[in-house]
Amino acid sequence: MPLWICETCGAQFPDSGHPPASCPICEDERQYVGWNGQIFLTRETLAERHRVVWRDDLGLTGLSLEPSFAIGQRALLVPLGDGCLMWDCVPLATAEAIAHVRSLGGLKAIAISHPHYYGALADWSDAFGGVPVYLHADDRQWVTRPHASIVHWTGESQRISDEVLLLRTGGHFAGATMLHSSRAADGRGAFLTGDIAQVAMDRRFVSFMYSYPNYMPLNASAVRRIAAAVEPLAFDRIYGAWWGRNIARGAKAAFAASVERYIAAIA
């Protein structure tokens, strides 16, 4: 029986003879049901219409779907020992993309910032022998395709290696997570933020939203919590959720200025 993928958010659902009645992620107020109604594609149909592409994005390999699908995010491969950690996830794993990731050392783990980017996490984990997928336990209810590889971590941080740390910052979702890599940016450190802290189009600031498509801003206390979580760590670069949406240098100062600007704007 086929697997089903939500056309609007890219979430995968278990094998079934018929598509799900609805997508709980899209019915939540932070997302939306597509204007043409709730549409699900089989994994095979998605693979016929789209392919996974990869390219460098400021020193990290990124992967995304072409033509763009669902939210249009890209995953990033973070060096992790003799392989990689996949940060965030795309809704499709193709043989060609799997082979390319294998040529880079393969996946050792997957970590995802929040439910909008869960995508084909089970397929990517299975392709590399069931590597662990780190999702914060506070977002457990949003997993649409349960899988044995999922590690529902708890608390405020989860260390993946000496160089890679996951931080629960909250904000966009209760378990919203950012990844800190002390090795990135030539050792100056980087945060991979997804859209928990969204890199603005000028690439000089970040901003914060409870819902991006429905224009619901994040409250000041949530933004202050995010700022307090990242402040103790050194970083000079931020990688956002889409191609090129990065702050290449001076990111820690830019982050602090962004917090001040945002709170002043909503006060």
Image: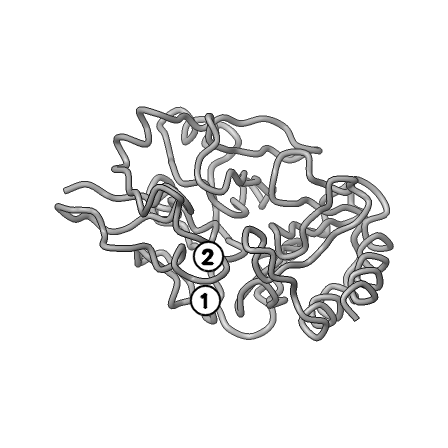
Type of amino acid at the residue the image marks with label 1: Asp
Q: Position of residue 67 (x, y in %)?
A: 46, 26
Seen in the picture, residue 132 relative to 185 is either above or below; the reply is below
256 or 267: nearer the eye? Answer: 267
* Numbered tag placed on residue 139 in the rendering: 1
Image-based side of 119 in relation to 4, left or right = right
Q: Position of residue 240 (x, y in %)?
A: 66, 45
Q: Is residue 83 visible?
A: no
User: Where, quadrant-wise, is the C terminus in this rendering?
Assistant: bottom right
Residue 187 at what x, y percent from top left?
Answer: 78, 45
Q: CA distance from mark 1 to mark 2?
A: 7 Å
Disc 1, disc 2: CB below 8 Å? Answer: yes
**At 31% across and 43% down in the image, what residue appears?**
5
Please tell me which residue is depicted at 80% across the width and 56% down the height of the picture: 255
Residue that label 2 marks? 115
**Quick check: 164 left or right of 40?**
right
> What kind of element bears circle 1?
helix
Residue 229's disc number:
none
Please state if 223 lies on the left or on the right of 166 as rendered: right
Of residues 212 and 104, the one drawn nearer to the viewer in this rendering: 212
